[in-house]
Image (cartoon, rainbow, N blue to C red):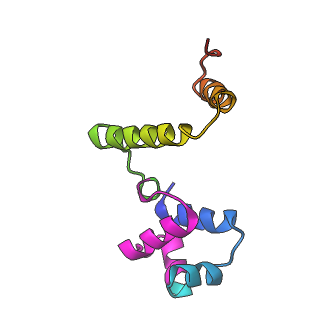
């Protein structure tokens, strides 16, 4: 899917008008329309606001695959963050998290 359609889908998913999204992104509605129809490209600042306001990653908007070294570094940071949050959980909550991870990764229940 192209960038314009991804941005349009975000707007549809939040059920907001072009005018509302243009205000959020601090751009002119006509400029947003041109972005959504792939007649213009958004600036880095617009992409950053979009990512922040709608909780999407810029790499996913641009279709960048972060496999390889950079992707692995990001993955390890996420795993470390999960580990830090787990320090605050009880044993039963940890069991629940482990079971959910097993389900999500298609593994059988841990022992």
Relative height, residue 60 to residue 109 (above, below): below
**Residue furthest top as drawn:** 111
What percent of the width, then of the height, locates residue 84?
A: 48, 41
Q: What is the span of residues highlighted in magenta in the rendered image?
A: 31-59
Which is more toward the observer, 57 or 84? 84
Residue 57 seen from this side: yes
What percent of the width, then of the height, locates residue 1?
A: 51, 54
Quarter holding residue 93: top right
- Measuring 49% from the left and 85% from the top, which residue is drawn there? 27
Residue 43 seen from this side: no
- Measuring 48% from the left and 74% from the top, which residue is drawn there? 35
Question: How many numbered marks, from 0 up?
Answer: 0
Magenta span dominant secondary structure: helix
Relative height, residue 67 to residue 103 (above, below): below
- Measuring 35% from the left and 41% from the top, which residue is drawn there? 71
Q: Is residue 77 magenta?
A: no
**Residue furthest left as drawn:** 69
Which is more toward the observer, 4 or 97? 97
Q: Is residue 54 magenta?
A: yes
């Amino acid at each position: 899917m192209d960038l314009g359609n991804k941005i349009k889908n975000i707007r549809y998913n939040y059920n907001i008008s072009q005018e509302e999204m243009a205000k959020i992104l601090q751009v002119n509605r006509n400029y947003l329309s041109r972005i959504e129809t792939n007649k213009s490209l958004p600036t880095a600042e617009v992409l950053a606001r979009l990512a922040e306001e709608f909780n999407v990653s810029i790499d996913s908007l641009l279709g960048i695959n972060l496999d390889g070294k950079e992707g692995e570094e990001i993955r390890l940071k996420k795993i470390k963050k999960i580990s830090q949050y787990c320090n605050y959980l009880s044993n039963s909550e940890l069991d629940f998290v482990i079971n959910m991870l097993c389900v999500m990764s298609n593994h059988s229940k841990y022992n």
